[in-house]
Image: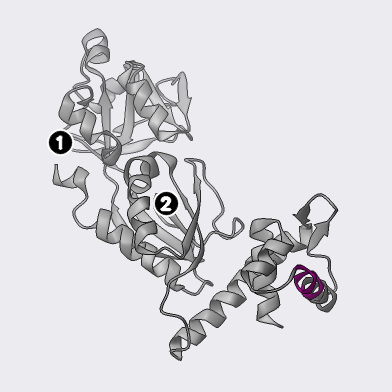
């Protein structure tokens, strides 16, 4: 299979413009269109729908796209092993991450990364909603949870320490819980799935949990920043990541609840990518950059 035609297809899929993809590869529009048609003929399937007004991926094209990217990545890695690749890191990097973490720690770093690697383009998907890394054709993602997917490779970015917190106003109105059992009488704000988290500490028992469902939670939120804002506004007690709340804890606008207890959550900030993918230069330098800027003594741990 002609990898140059695959590169053309991948670029055309990203730009939704065959002529623009061809120009980037040094092909006249007619040549690019003819080359893509020959690729489709060899595969026996239409990869793209064309009209006089626009280009769109077909269902078959969407299914074939991650495989085309993988073939190109394999070729680039092989050429690099032989010293045949360009020393200039380049290409489109598709990265997915929690919107809450990215807004605080990754987005402010992007100008420096883009200046350091001027031939790299970033396509970011920022959402606190769970997603499928492989089906989404992402090169790299940040996940803040226990990893259970054996199809993924990963690098640890930092620990993700979880705490319970509330606003001073809420605690002045409803009082400070003295033990985990007291949480049942409080307004607990749940994040996404309402699942209970075990609490460990002095006098803890097997029933010591932060459990919004048992407390009859009336507020469920699927966005980390909104969870923090609701807590700041006095809506109740929430379980938050320390990276998301350390500044407010220092300011006193949030207060630790049951500070002598720890949330047994097994959560870590992981940089993950599909096991089948070659670790291309663009992915490697982005991982190294994030480890350099965030992973070496995260600010929330040093405080």
Q: Position of residue 21 (x, y in %)?
A: 67, 65
- How packed is label 1: few (under 14 Cα within 10 Å), some, or many (20 or more)? few
Q: Nearer the viewer, mark 2 or mark 1?
A: 2
Q: Secondary structure at mark 1?
A: loop
Is 207 positioned to the left or the right of 258 in the image?
right
Q: Which residue is mark 1?
A: 202
> Which residue is most to the front?
28
Q: Position of residue 80 (x, y in %)?
A: 45, 84
Residue drawn 62% across and 68% down? 24
Instruction: Tell me: residue 196, above or below residue 184.
Output: below
- How packed is label 2: few (under 14 Cα within 10 Å), some, or many (20 or more)? many
Residue 282 appears in view: yes
**Label 2 to label 1, Cα distance in Å?**
31 Å
Viewer-nearest residue: 176 or 226: 226
- Please tell me in which quadrant of the rendered image residue 50 appears: bottom right
Q: Which mark is residue 118?
A: none
Q: Which residue is mark 2?
A: 143
Can residue 31 be found in the magenta stretch? yes
Viewer-nearest residue: 282 or 239: 282
Residue drawn 44% across and 21% down? 217
Q: Secondary structure at mark 2?
A: strand
Give the residues drawn in magenta, as a range.
Answer: 29-35
Can residue 231 be found in the magenta stretch? no
Q: Position of residue 181 (x, y in %)?
A: 27, 24
């Amino acid at each position: 299979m002609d990898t140059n035609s695959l590169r053309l297809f991948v670029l055309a899929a990203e730009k939704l413009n065959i002529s623009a993809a061809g120009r980037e590869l040094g092909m006249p529009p007619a040549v690019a269109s003819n080359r893509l048609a020959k690729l489709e003929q060899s595969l026996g399937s239409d990869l793209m729908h064309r009209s006089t007004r626009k280009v769109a991926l077909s269902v078959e094209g969407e299914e074939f796209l991650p495989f085309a990217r993988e073939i190109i990545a394999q070729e680039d890695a092989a050429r690099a092993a032989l010293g045949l690749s360009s020393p200039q890191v380049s290409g489109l990097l598709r990265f997915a991450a929690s919107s809450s973490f990215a807004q605080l720690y990754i987005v402010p770093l992007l100008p420096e990364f883009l200046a350091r690697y001027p031939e790299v383009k970033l396509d970011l998907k920022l959402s606190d909603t769970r997603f499928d890394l492989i089906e989404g054709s992402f090169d790299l993602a940040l996940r803040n949870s226990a990893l259970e997917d054996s199809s993924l490779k990963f690098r640890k970015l930092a620990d993700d320490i979880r705490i319970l917190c509330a606003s001073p106003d809420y605690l002045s109105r409803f009082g400070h819980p003295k033990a985990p059992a007291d949480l049942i009488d409080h307004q607990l704000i749940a994040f996404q799935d309402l699942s209970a988290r075990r609490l460990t500490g002095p006098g803890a028992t097997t029933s010591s949990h932060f459990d919004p469902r048992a407390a009859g939670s009336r507020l469920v939120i699927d966005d980390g920043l909104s969870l923090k804002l609701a807590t700041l506004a006095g809506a109740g007690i929430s379980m938050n990541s320390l990276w998301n709340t350390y500044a407010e804890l220092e300011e006193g606008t949030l207060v630790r609840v049951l500070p002598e207890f720890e949330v047994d959550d097994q959560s870590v900030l992981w940089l993950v990518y599909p096991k089948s993918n070659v670790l291309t230069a663009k992915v490697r330098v982005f991982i190294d950059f994030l480890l350099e800027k965030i992973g070496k003594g995260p600010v929330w741990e040093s405080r």
